[in-house]
Amino acid sequence: MEFNAVLGEYGPMLSRIVASYEVDPAQQQEVLQDVSLALWQALPKFRGDGSLKAFVARVAQNRAVSHVAKAANRPRQAELNDEIICKADGPEVRLEKEQQRAQLLYAVRALPLNLRQVTTLALEGFSHREIAETLGISENNAMVRFSRAKEALKLQMARGNTVQRGVE
């Protein structure tokens, strides 16, 4: 498959995967470029054994994880800049949705790496089988990780809601 066609089809997914690992928009662009280069290099090696979507996501996950490992000691001070707004909603609804998205994205970023990987792929609509294929783990392991990730996200989201309301 042609590289530009793959980027055209899976570009939004790649951007979301990268955003789940990096807060700073400038760094997101850098990681996205790194992912694109890695995908360009890896695409000729795609044999068609699994789905192209899983292959593309695996490349993105691997590069994002490498970025997280390299950036672990770097201080983070950038603000979240996610501009996914539904134009049909009123300002109050848009603000509430934006706050919910931001809270979810922060909660996902706070997960341990193995749970973050599974969650990011699940949010992209991957099945447990596709997640397992992408991450090179068993389907049962993918289900267990996702179950743990959901519980951790519920706790973080509930905690975030109480903090926002000033309960803590």
Image (tube, rainbow, N blue to C red):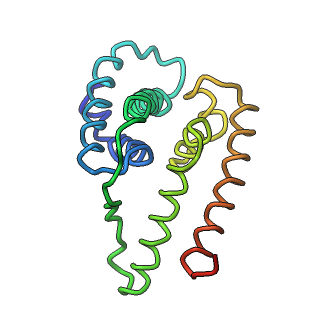
Instruction: Please tell me whether residue 64 is drawn above or below residue 2 in the rendered image.
Output: below
Which x, y percent locates residue 6? Answer: 32, 33
- Residue at image position (48%, 57%) is 105
Which x, y percent locates residue 25? Answer: 27, 51
Q: Disc count in the image?
A: 0
- Quadrant where the N terminus sits is top left
Instruction: Please tell me whether residue 12 is drawn above or below residue 132 in the rendered image.
Output: below
Question: Which of the two residues, 97 or 162, is positioned nearer the viewer here?
Answer: 162
- Quadrant where the C terminus sits is bottom right
Instruction: Please tell me whether residue 92 is drawn above or below residue 76 in the rendered image.
Output: below
- Residue at image position (58%, 68%) is 160
- Residue at image position (70%, 39%) is 145
- Residue at image position (44%, 30%) is 69
Left/right placement of residue 6 relative to residue 50 reads left
Q: Quadrant of residue 37?
A: top left
Q: Quadrant of residue 14?
A: top left
Question: Which of the two residues, 49 or 103, is positioned nearer the viewer here?
Answer: 103
Left/right placement of residue 26 relative to residue 6 reads left
Question: Which of the two residues, 40 or 95, is positioned nearer the viewer here?
Answer: 95
